[in-house]
Every structure is written in structure tokens, then in C-alpha cells.
Amino acid sequence: MKKNIIIHLLLAIVLMLSLFSCGRKASAPPRPSLRAFPRVEVPSMYESESDRMNYFVQRYWDRFTDTSEVFFCDSTTVNGVSLDGLEEAMGMYVTLLEKTSGDVAEQSLSRLCDRLLAFEKKDTASNVMEEVLRLTEKYLYDPQSPVRDEDKFEVVASRFSEGNPRYSFIARMSSLNRVGTPATDFEFTDTKGRLRTLYSIKADYTLLIFGNPDCTACKNLTVAMSGDPRINSLISSGRLKVVDIYIDREVDLWKSKVDEYPSEWINGYDHKFKIREDLIYHVRAIPSMYLLDKSKIVLMKDAPENKLLQYLSSL
């Protein structure tokens, strides 16, 4: 009973504090009903599907971040929208970003940053910027997100990097090996003790994997790739070379388990430990996968497994 009383007292305190969280006075009216996330209305003048999509994505957050009216917010509500509703809206937004060109996606994210800054200036007590940035990072940057895209999140991190050491570091690291740029070359030692470089690998496509023989996700990836006849065909024809690189210092552990890797792969370890220690690649979790073209231009960066396998199977 005492525990329940304490819990209810704490909830009452939280509720009381929430009345001030959006800059309202203590005499504010009772909490209004939640609203749905406000959707964009595309003008009829935009007729083509691509034009309508671009308009929708560019202005996706406009009505939610409209500063002409500030709605209720507390620990579970963001400008009148529930946290669940806001996260659902973010999930849809990220899905739409994937369907647009890189330029449109970057412009949309830049516009979102502008809107967040304007809203923060209008109501410094709101939680709009905090929650939208949290969800943007969760979907676009978290290494476990199936829709992560470091290049897109770099737009956001760069915008808020001034005075924020964490975002500054993220922006700097996310700028490495961007899609459309040449991958950084490096040396490695293969299973036969030969010194090789990434750029010495000749193929139409190179799949670069940073992994570990004790990594469960790495093993699952190996099984998934080995069981895909289309990917096996790419490898056997020589069009695709898979290069799996161990980047940690326990080299003896790696050597004791090299037989567990597919023999068709090129397996090696970073004998200079440059990848991990000099941060020439941003490896936040393993496996981390980069798909490169014939000229070693990055086609996919730290690609989610489902996207990577789907792409390879379509070649």
C-alpha cells in the first residue's frame, strides 16, 4: 500500500511539472485531447507522382512544427501528439526518404532542422526538438536499425554539431566513405600470410565485411549468403568478391577459426590495426558491410543486412 501511495505521489508530481513543460502557467486548463500527427496536403498543381512525393517529403514536418500554435506536451506527448504517434510518423518519414533521391532527402532533412530550430526559439520549454532528434537518430543512426543511413543522419548531426561534441564526432565520422565516393584503401594480411590491399581485389563488385568469427550476427550473415543461389552464382562467376576483415587485436583467436569462413571468400586481418584505431572506417557494430563497385566507389555504406542481400540478389 505504501509503495502504491509513493507511486501515485510521484505521478502527481510529474503531472504537475508537466503543466509547466510547454511554458504554460499553473492555471493552465486541463490537458486537451491528443491530436493525430498532422499530414501534408499536396496542392493539386503537383500532378506527377515524383513531384507529389518530393513535395510531401520536403514539407512532411511543416504542420507539426508550425509555430503559430503550440500544443500540449509532457513526458508522453509531443506538441499534442502521443510519443507512439510521433514514432509512427518518423517511421513513415524514413521510409519515404528511401524512395526519394539523395538530394531531395538531404533538402528535406535540412528543412526539418530549420523547423526544429524555429520551434525551439518560439517555445524553449517544449520537447519537440528533443524527441524528434531522438527518433531521427534511432531510425537513421542506431546500428541496430534496419533502415539506418549514416549519410542521411550526417545532415542532422552536422547542423547541430556546434557546441555539441557528440554530434560533432558523429558528423565527422559519418563523413567517411560516403556513398558515391571512393572507399579508403588499406592493407591486410590474408589467411596465407600474404600482404594485400583492398584495391588489389579485382571484381565488378566487392563486398567488404568487418566481422568477427565469434559474432552471432556475422555467422547468421554467412549462412544467409551461403544459402542464396544468386549470390553464390555471383561469387563463382567472379563478378562478386567477398572480403571479410578482422579488425581487433585478438589475432590468434581469428587464426584459430579461419576455417569457419567460406573458402570462396577472401579473409584477412588488419595487421596494422588502422581501421579500428585510426578510424579510417566508422565501424560501430559488426558485421559492418560496404558494397563497392569495380572502381571501389561506395554503393552501400554500413548496409543493413536485408537491404544488402536484396540488392545482391537483384544483380
Image: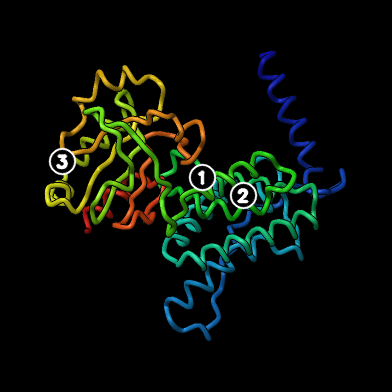
> Farthest residue toward the bottom?
45
Q: Which residue is mark 1?
A: 141
Identify the element where label 3 is drawn.
Answer: loop
- Kind of residue indicated by mark 1: Tyr
Residues at discs 3 and 1 in contact (Cβ within 8 Å): no
Q: Which residue is mark 2?
A: 157
Q: Give the residue at x 47% y 36%.
A: 284
Q: Position of residue 150 (x, y in %)?
A: 49, 49
In this rendering, position of residue 288 left or right of residue 68: left
In this rendering, position of residue 309 left or right of residue 47: left
Give the number of the disc on residue 227: 3
Q: Give the residue at x 31% y 49%.
A: 308
Q: Give the residue at x 65% y 44%.
A: 168
Estimate how packed mark 2 is, as few (under 14), some (14 to 19) or many (20 or more) residues with alpha carbons within 10 Å: many
Identify the element where label 1 is drawn.
Answer: loop
- Between 229 and 169, which is closer to the camera in this rendering? 169
- Kind of residue indicated by mark 2: Ala
In this rendering, position of residue 125 left or right of residue 46: right
Q: Earlier in the sequence, mark 3 or mark 1?
A: 1
Q: Earlier in the sequence, mark 2 or mark 1?
A: 1
Q: Is residue 10 above or below residue 97?
A: above
Residues at discs 2 and 1 in contact (Cβ within 8 Å): yes
Q: How did the renderer colour the structure? A: rainbow
- Kind of residue indicated by mark 3: Gly
